[in-house]
Image (cartoon, coloured by chain):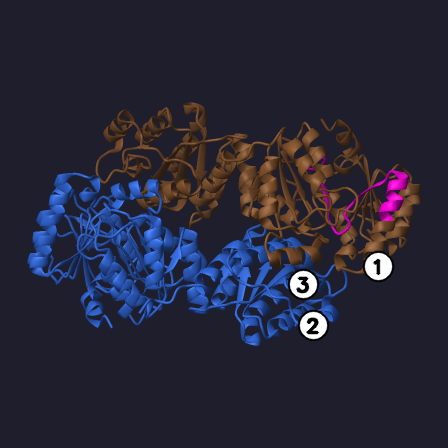
Chain colours: A blue, B brown
Amino acid sequence: MFENRVTELRPVFNPRSIAVVGATTDEHKSGSKWVLGLRAAGYRGALYPVSPRGGSIAGLTIYPSLESVPGDVEHVIASVPVASALQLMDECIRKHARVVMFFTAGFAETGSQAGRELERVMLEKARAAGLRIIGPNCIGSYCPGDRIPLGPAAPGRLGIPGKTGFISQSGGIAAKLVENGIARRICFSKGVSVGNSIDLDASDFLEYFGGDTGTNAVGVYLEGTRDGRRLFRTLRSVCGLKPVVVWKGGRTAAGAAAARSHTGSMASSAPVWSAALRQAGAIEARSLEELTDCLLLLQQLGPIRVRNVAVVGGLADGGGGISVSGSDACNDNALAVPELSLGTKETLQQLIGEVGSILRNPVDVSPAQFRGPDTLFRALETVAHEPGIDVILLQEDMDIMLSFLGRAETQVINAYLATLPKVCGKPLVMVLPSGSAETERVEVEAQLLAAGVPVFPTMARAARALGLLSHRPVPAQ
Amino acid sequence: MFENRVTELRPVFNPRSIAVVGATTDEHKSGSKWVLGLRAAGYRGALYPVSPRGGSIAGLTIYPSLESVPGDVEHVIASVPVASALQLMDECIRKHARVVMFFTAGFAETGSQAGRELERVMLEKARAAGLRIIGPNCIGSYCPGDRIPLGPAAPGRLGIPGKTGFISQSGGIAAKLVENGIARRICFSKGVSVGNSIDLDASDFLEYFGGDTGTNAVGVYLEGTRDGRRLFRTLRSVCGLKPVVVWKGGRTAAGAAAARSHTGSMASSAPVWSAALRQAGAIEARSLEELTDCLLLLQQLGPIRVRNVAVVGGLADGGGGISVSGSDACNDNALAVPELSLGTKETLQQLIGEVGSILRNPVDVSPAQFRGPDTLFRALETVAHEPGIDVILLQEDMDIMLSFLGRAETQVINAYLATLPKVCGKPLVMVLPSGSAETERVEVEAQLLAAGVPVFPTMARAARALGLLSHRPVPAQ
């Protein structure tokens, strides 16, 4: 499905050549930053800075106009004044560019009649010539596999290529998604910020990601839509193929008013959106954190559904309170924390049941810390082998861990945890809260993430993401 | 009020002498870690390690028994086997100790008849002799002003003394509270973990904090209570004196079952607790993060109530999407984001209103970035001076900020932000999300916190804490 859309939009994400109009010798200009960012990231296609002032940047000749560029240009990045937009459209068409992305803002989102009229004429020109527009008022596309960073801001911050796609109406949210992705090892295939989306919109890119074999799951930040009927029809089709997580900005009255002046979106009421998302089979996130957490879980564990969680505390975290609040967090998200079977509890009792033991589920493994790693590993495997359990939710506090057990034993335990899902054939979801041993925590997080284990900062966020995935709706037929 | 309780419990928090029973020459034993922690923190009272094996630790003689200690002992820390508990009680009484804290676990929380019986006899002995017990199954008290760290785990991690008190039924949660406090500059007066609380319980310590002139606000983590009537009566009295934030663990069925085996608490249903907390005038938090966030806000801004928020995005964060979702977060927590007056909007239009401007409230100040700090400052002051606005909620992304504006200008802006509340006479609540420039973010966070500005990791968490404080109940008469 959607093969034509994938072919058509190839120059958005995998352009063979890019011209940046508005890149000058002044490295502080946005256009210049775009060129520097692409160079620093190692973009391997043809790259042409364009500005009437000429000169050079990053060792590249600046061409005075799009037409004076010697080679073909598939993808144009426009960082020009709004007054030059129509003229640039004509140049793009004469150059036979396939897509033009307008970083330029100041169109319909200002609320002015002139802005709306300008958008109308641009669209007319584009449609007549078969040129496609991204934006305006956006920061364009992102493809770490082709070494195309997102936006002009952070040269070199590219991230590891992966299988997660995203569409964001807001450039700022898109940048935060990529930042969070880099920090938490969410690996993106491609992403796009669509801004005012006068031509290519969220529906077009949903079709693209639906058909893109390199994308397994899609995250979406939307403030509104011009064609809700098509959006939800498309969403339903794509949700039948791969999971889609949608965060709707402008859910509330204040948010909706802001969205109008941000991307010119007319937002509907929250209950209407929620119902439509549910019918389409999309997972609804309510914040950047929920969106990011769901994408991480999908990447690490695939589109799992779980019912029964084993909550394990006490890996040097003081156990009891964490176990209690972890259980609350699971129940809050309609996940069960069922009592373990008698046989399992007896085995745990023999292994770690000295005093004050919490062995019912949640399980507090703190006594096992003092009996050496092997006892701890056997206790964790005993819990994992309980037949009714679908997933192990385990909290580890790196600072207390290091202080109690020392560096060598902590390393042994973390290396084991990375292998636990393979050893037991059940997924492990880790919670590594921030603390004083931040350097070590980040190292262990990276190690676990690389081994396929999803890592969250709190029990509440882990349980929320597990709940959202497990109770995701089935697309209506 | 509660002067007697304050006098009575002075040896819990400000003991002139401490004996640690179970501190040996083996530095890996919990008792030994307690002595090492107190020494590293610089506790200035008399400190006596006690163990029948003798020897010395940290330059201190280990006395063979409590009775052989040469001086008075006010406060006993007991890290002994459960089988020695009764004998130690007798020794404490003979030594005329004022309070004994049992780190020792394995009492009623195991569910055994023997555990319950042991607790009963201990309590009987204590009552007869006027000795008070903290715990058992807890990590005791914390008083950074007297250089008493919390628990045996992290020597030297003391924190800055301040005006926030806490009571936690769980030692693990108490440790996380102090860790979070150190990371986010929440400065504690005193704190206590109460565990099974067979003698001194949450109500006693609520009375203490109610009367303690060094404490302005109290955080509580509770899993249950033996005397709900007294707890809520006390809570209502204390809430009339200073704000109390309560996080109830074991709200759900799974959490309640866990709480029973953790601290032996019989938990009631969530709606019953919520209603009772509301009637008592307490602020109800539902996670460690909410509890911490409320305590930070109370410390930095006092017990404020706000109605109208100015949401400001665009401090190098891509503005629009953050403004939209920040507005959603405010509305989610019943805070208004009212449209600014025509005069204010016109001033903003002149200052920063070039293209795509969001000036209605939320306000996106991103265009001001490119016009130098003075324009930005004038824009922020214009928003702050709008009469209807009670608080400014501002997000700043350190990584994008540094990349766009460079280090020098970023420093100028952050130094200004620290002064904004004084300049404008309105509180500022900052959101500094994690990103790539983590070192710089932590520096700026510390700078703002020291200046009295509360700092949160996300708009959602800031708005949640503001909402909880602003809509806190008034204690029933």
Q: Label 2 lies in what chain?
A: A
Secondary element at image label 3: loop
Does residue B127 appear in this view? yes
Location of mark 1 (residue):
B114
Q: Amino acid at mark 1?
A: Ala
Q: Secondary structure at mark 1?
A: helix
Q: Are marks 2 and 1 on the same chain?
A: no
Residue type marked 2: Leu
Q: Is residue B303 above or below residue B434?
A: above
Query: How many residues crowd around disc 3 within 10 Å: few (fewer than 14), some, or many (20 or more)?
Result: many
For this view, does A426 lie left or right of residue A413?
Answer: left
In the shown orientation, is residue A212 left or right of residue B20? left
Q: Quadrant of residue B391?
A: top left
Q: Is residue B313 left or right of residue B259?
A: left
* x and y percentages locating residue A427 in the rendered image: 52, 70
Q: Pick whichever, B459 or B49, lies toward us.
A: B459
Residue A413 tag number = none
Based on the picture, tell me whether residue B306 belongs to the magenta stretch.
Answer: no
Judging depth in this view, the residue of A308 and A56 nearest the camera is: A308
Question: Label 3: which residue?
Answer: A365
- Few, some or many C-alpha atoms within 10 Å of disc 1 (few <14, some 14-19, many ≥20)? few
- Disc 2 target residue: A342
Chain to which the residue tagged by mark 3 belongs: A
**Residue B139 among magenta residues:** yes
Identity of the amino acid at label 3? Answer: Val
Q: Which residues are magenta?
A: B122-147
Q: Quadrant of the C terminus of chain A?
A: bottom left
Q: Reading the chain from its start, which is encountered first: label 2 or label 3?
A: 2
